[in-house]
Amino acid sequence: MRMLRDNQQLLILDAGSNRGIGLNLTKAFLSQSYNVFATIRPKSRLDSSFRDLEETGATILELDFLDEKSIASAARAYGNKPLDVLINVGGLPPNPKPWKDQTSSLMLERLRAMTIVSPYLTMTEFLPQLELATNPKVINISSSFGSISISGTLALVWESEGRNTTIICVEPGFLYTKLTGWDGEDDMETCIKGLMKIIDSISHEDTGAFLKWDGSKIPF
């Protein structure tokens, strides 16, 4: 199945494309011969799982969702070329502070940064490249209310400005990943196929929508 035009640029932004949903999306799109750019946090190069991403053949960019300068740097590294699909995969990377040093305000700040600020920054930093594409799409993969909210808000703002970028938020399912503590009920391969089908089928009329991985609409 070929979903998009030949040689489309697909960028997967993930707190760690070396595992989980990010890695599986990378493999799936590369199997369809798409030009995939995957991101990792700089420290992830030291992780043994980095080799899994490296072996896919994807172009790897460094990006830390909790570092605004890192997001801007990744956009510069991507360059001045069309970006057809931007995928934000939500998820909190490991906290460097010991559990005994955690506070409710610190945890809430990290959650806000990952689910609201980071998706907003990635969408705005890569907007120039998105606008070079014919039918640009932004897919925020998250069940967080913050991600849903920023997707809907920015969709309305860009719509009022006459921009043609389609923005949606997708709930990925309860998958067996490190983020879920290696617990899950949904099948990864089935959910990935569902996500790919959504990316193929959505149009600008869907902008601002919140969908489940199987394509069904979720009211919010």
Image (tube, rainbow, N blue to C red):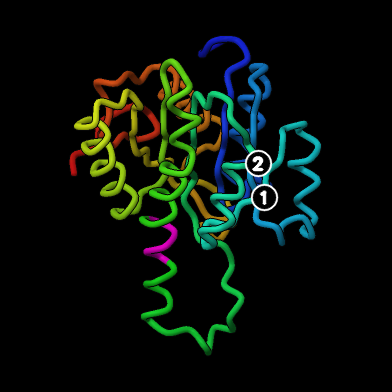
Question: In this rendering, is residue 1 above or below 101?
Answer: above
Residue 197 horizontal side relative to residue 164, left or right: right
Give the percent coordinates (x, y) of residue 175. 50, 46
Mainly helix, strand or loop, the magenta region? helix
Look at the numbered disc 2 and give the secondary structure of its residue. helix
Name the residue beneath numbered marker 1: 62
The quadrant of the picture occupied by the C terminus is top left
Name the residue beneath numbered marker 2: 77
Label pair 1/2, CB-CB below 8 angstroms: yes
Give 82 or 20, whichever is nearer the viewer: 82
The quadrant of the picture occupied by the N terminus is top right
Residue 33 horizontal side relative to residue 104, left or right: right
Q: Name the quadrant containing residue 69.
A: bottom right
- Residues shaded magenta: 111-115
Q: Amino acid at mark 1?
A: Glu
Q: Amino acid at mark 2?
A: Ala
Give the percent coordinates (x, y) of residue 57. 77, 31
Q: Earlier in the sequence, mark 1 or mark 2?
A: 1
Other residues around mark 2 within 10 Å, as few (<14) / some (14–19) / many (≥20): few
Q: How far apart are the two marked residues, 1 and 2, measured between alpha carbons?
A: 9 Å
Give 214 or 65, whichever is nearer the viewer: 65
Give the percent coordinates (x, y) of residue 4. 51, 13
Look at the numbered disc 1 and give the secondary structure of its residue. strand
Residue, x 27% and y 34% (percent of image)?
Answer: 158
Q: Name the quadrant containing residue 114.
A: bottom left
